[in-house]
Image: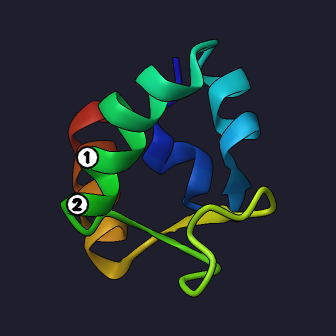
Amino acid sequence: MPSIAALVAEQTQGRDELMAALKRKDRKTFAENYLSLALKNGLVEITQPNSPDSPTQKYLLTAKGHALYDLLSIKDHT
């Protein structure tokens, strides 16, 4: 199963797109267990910071998120 980092490494994704790719159905649990942790740890950021609850909100990797993703990708291939 892909990770949030893998899904947003190349392009921005919306919450529903991420949930579908990760096979998650409950929005509240997904937000609490995945998105909020990634946001809090500076791994992803939102594309509309002035409208955090916008239905068109997208997520993308930060530089820190890219560094972690690259590190984990290297470990997966060794």
Q: Give me the residue at 63% from left, 77% from top.
A: 51
| Residue that numbered label 1 is attached to | 37
How crowded pointer 2 is (Cα within 10 Å; few <14, some 14-19, many 20+) is rated as: few
Quadrant hosting residue 60: bottom right
Front residue of this view, candidates 25 and 74: 25
Quadrant hosting residue 19: top right
Measure how far apart labels 2 and 1 are at the Cα level. Answer: 5 Å
Front residue of this view, candidates 60 and 48: 48
Q: Indicate the position of residue 64 as horizontal and vertical percent values.
A: 25, 73
Please name the colour scheme applied to the rendered image. rainbow
Above or below, 12 relative to 35: below
Which amino acid is tagged 1?
Leu
Give yes or no for contact between labels 2 and 1 (Cβ–Cβ under 8 Å): yes
Identify the secondary structure beneath mark 1: helix
Q: In this view, does 76 lie to the left or right of 15?
A: left
Front residue of this view, candidates 30 and 13: 30
The disc label shown at residue 40, or none: 2
Q: In this view, does 32 lie to the left or right of 12?
A: left
Farthest-out residue, bottom: 50
- Numbered circles on residues, count: 2
Identify the secondary structure beneath mark 2: helix
Q: Give me the residue at 64% from left, 12% from top.
A: 25
Above or below, 45 relative to 39: below
Q: Indicate the position of residue 36 as horizontal and vertical percent values.
A: 33, 48
Q: In this view, does 44 lie to the left or right of 64?
A: right
Q: Indicate the position of residue 70 as horizontal and vertical percent values.
A: 32, 59
Which amino acid is tagged 2?
Lys
How crowded pointer 1 is (Cα within 10 Å; few <14, some 14-19, many 20+) is rated as: few
The disc label shown at residue 10, or none: none
Q: Give me the residue at 64% from left, 80% from top.
A: 48
Q: Give me the residue at 22% from left, 60% from top.
A: 40
Above or below, 58 relative to 29: below
